[in-house]
Amino acid sequence: MRRNVSQVIGYTLEQCLSPRVHNALFAPSLPLRYTKGRNDTIDSFDGRKRWLHGTATLAQKPRGVQLSSERFPQLKRGDFARVTDSDLQVFERLVPSRVLTDLEDIEGHNVDWSGTCRGDGQVLLRPKTTEEVSAVLRYCSGRRLAVVPQGGNTGLVGGSVPVFDEVIISLSLMDNIISLDEISGVLVCQAGCVVDKINGALEPHGLMTPHILGSKGSCQIGGNISTNAGGLRMLRYGNLHGNVLGVEAVLANGDVVDCMSTLRKDNTGYDLKQLFIGSEGSLGVVTAASLLCPRVPAAVSVALLGCDSFAQVLQTYNAAKRMLQEILSAVEFMDRASMEVVQENLHLTCPLGTHSYYLLVETSGSNAAHDEEKLNSLLGHVMEKGIVDDGTVATEPSKVQTLWALRENVAVALRADGCVYKYDVTVPMSRFYDLVADTRKRMGTDVTRVVGYRHLGESDIHLNVTCPQNSEDVFGALEPWVYDWVAKYKGSVSAEHGMGILKRDYLYHSNTGSAVLLMKQLKKLMDPKGILNPYKVFPD
């Protein structure tokens, strides 16, 4: 049976549709029923309407996911108190009418989007203000109650859900946009603001967020900051370390750290906000932020180019940087297997012939004629030099979206193969595709396909390996081999999402012992009782 592709094309939740972890099972050849609602669900059922693999928010029904405490038996619960009735009474005073203890209400907050990590949290708190977060953390610190801060819960490494019975602090009600300076482009908001909501507030003023994410309808800015989320146009606008001007965060003891600058230049002392960007809620709970927002481009053009060697890919990338410069906003890479999977499983049409590699080059600027001329000049140059064998340029919005759909729907198409093992890593540009080639050679005919795609301009590659069903042999061949390979060539085992619980054992693969020691010292200094998001980031 064919999938109902018309219901999924154009709405890609790339982060969550291709879980990497080995016990995420996906049944092939099943129709998709897409319901875009509060939870942005994508369900799959067999003919008897039996649940098979859940929603885009949860790859499996929560209670069908193995408890993380069972899956990682080497993990032992820390020396933390357990929530009592007296604690619940205090919580009710601190966040009145926003204390949830019904497991039906909590179960979705115990499982992350990968559908592979499940905690056993018994209490969910929903503060509305920084003062409430401060009061909750001050009390939990005094009682030695472990907590896990949670935003949109769109991560893939188990970083935003409990491991045992930690108290969940959901920031979803902290969704106020506080101010917007249209001249400077600085927006100030609470941490629970969904990225789509922020863009909705920015759009009338001709502004947008600097990061574009597949999960923008669900992910929250506080979670983005805590994981240093990148996105499709990081090449143009950079990551959140550069675009977050200020942060307000609550420490484990309840102290509020106000670093809410709205200035682009401030060299007075240590830049403390950077400690909270990418620290996964382990040093403090981000409650508000100021964000530098760029102008919405007046013109967007896209070129799809075909190359037959990876050397040509790198030459084309260099030519694009040289010839497009200030208007270059994205360079996305797809290999032949990526293009084949969207054609075979989603029946999309590629306007080019068959090539070993494809590049999607996007420009964003203020003058459509100028930008189109520069993009056409690039195309003419690389084809004349024999670097690119085939290419097309799109300037109309509908045609631009059609070309982007080929890249954005790779993750959706991979899901149809069955089980997907997904790795999001960074490797030096010179070794960018070697990881895919070496994996393909290693796995041979034991898998359906090995696919490589992602952001060429950031050396960030998505390695995806698919097979009809979960296989311990396949997983054993991939891990830790993939991470060992990345470490060998001085890459990073986590390009997005952080370490969480799934990657914590590989922290030393991308960091020196002295660096990890300093991280642990910072953690001990800022959270001496270890109550903030325990069991994450650091190996035992």
Image (tube, rainbow, N blue to C red):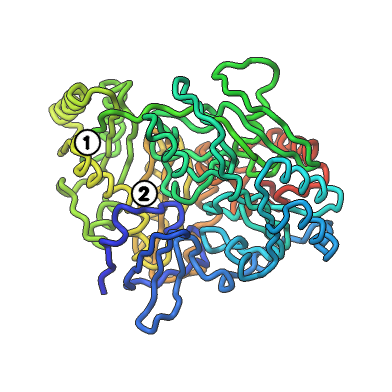
Tell me where residue 189 appears, x and y as whole percent: 56, 36
Which residue appears at 73% of the width and 47% of the height?
A: 532
**Which residue in the rendered view is the most extreme toward the bottom?**
48
* Sequence-first tag of 1 and 2: 1
Q: Where 421 falls versus 530 (above or below)?
A: below
Circle 1 residue: 303
Circle 2 residue: 452
Q: Label 1 is placed on what type of residue?
A: Ala
| Circle on res. 277 | none
Mark 1, Cα crowd under 10 Å, few <14 / some 14-19 / many 20+, is: many
Near-viewer residue (500 or 477): 500
Tell me the SS state at disc 1.
strand
Tell me where residue 415 appears, x and y as whole percent: 37, 62
Which residue appears at 27% of the width and 39% of the height?
A: 359
Using the numbered discs, state the Cα–Cα distance from disc 1 to disc 2 in whole angstroms.
20 Å
Mark 2, Cα crowd under 10 Å, few <14 / some 14-19 / many 20+, is: many
Near-viewer residue (46 or 414): 46
Q: Label 2 is placed on what type of residue?
A: Gly
Tell me where residue 480 appears, x and y as whole percent: 56, 54
Near-viewer residue (185 or 366): 185
Tell me the SS state at disc 2.
strand
